[in-house]
Image (cartoon, rainbow, N blue to C red):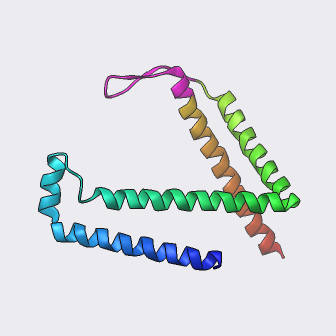
Amino acid sequence: MSIQKITTYVALALGVLGLIFQVLILRAGDDVIEMNSLAGNFSKVSPMIYLAIFILVVTVLITVASSLISLASDGAKLKKALISIAAFLFVVLISFLFSEGVETPMKDGEVLSATGSRLVGTGLRTFYILAIVAVGAMLFSGVKRFLK
């Protein structure tokens, strides 16, 4: 039996299981589910949530594994990926070096540490740099195509 057939049967089984959980939730009704949840009883909704988490985890694992296998099988792809990762880490390092941290009181009474503040600044600066690079690449591509 091929991998594609196994995948099809597993997807079908998970779909049927999700459909069964959906019917059970709909049969219970909103009021019953709300009353049970106020009492801390989530037995009607929990199976659907666990199924969704399971499907998400399996999908992520399969995607990461197939990506790594694809990268490992082609040296040129691996080199490009490593260069891209290094460039991203360089942008994060530059953002971190230009960020500063200050202890900041928050609305709930807690205090954001200086390190936490610096990490937030790093994330924002990284986003801004990557956004500028993306817009610049789109403009460059558009102008280059326009001139041809």
- Asked whether, in this view, residue 71 is left or right of residue 76, the answer is left
| Residue range (magenta) | 101-118
Residue 90 image-quadrant placement: top right
Measured as percent of width and height from the top left, residue 53 is found at 43, 56
Residue found 35% across the figure and 57% down from its top: 49
Which one is nearer the viewer's eye here, 24 or 101? 24
Which one is nearer the viewer's eye here, 57 or 113? 57
Residue found 37% across the figure and 26% down from its top: 106
Measured as percent of width and height from the top left, residue 11 is found at 49, 73
- Asked whether, in this view, residue 111 is left or right of residue 46, the answer is right
Residue found 85% across the figure and 53% down from its top: 79
Q: Compared with residue 86, is residue 69 higher up or lower down, i.e. above or below?
A: below
Residue found 29% across the figure and 70% down from its top: 22
- Asked whether, in this view, residue 98 is left or right of residue 28, the answer is right
Q: How many marks?
A: 0
Measured as percent of width and height from the top left, residue 139 is found at 71, 62
The quarter of the picture where the C terminus appears is: bottom right
Q: Is residue 108 magenta?
A: yes
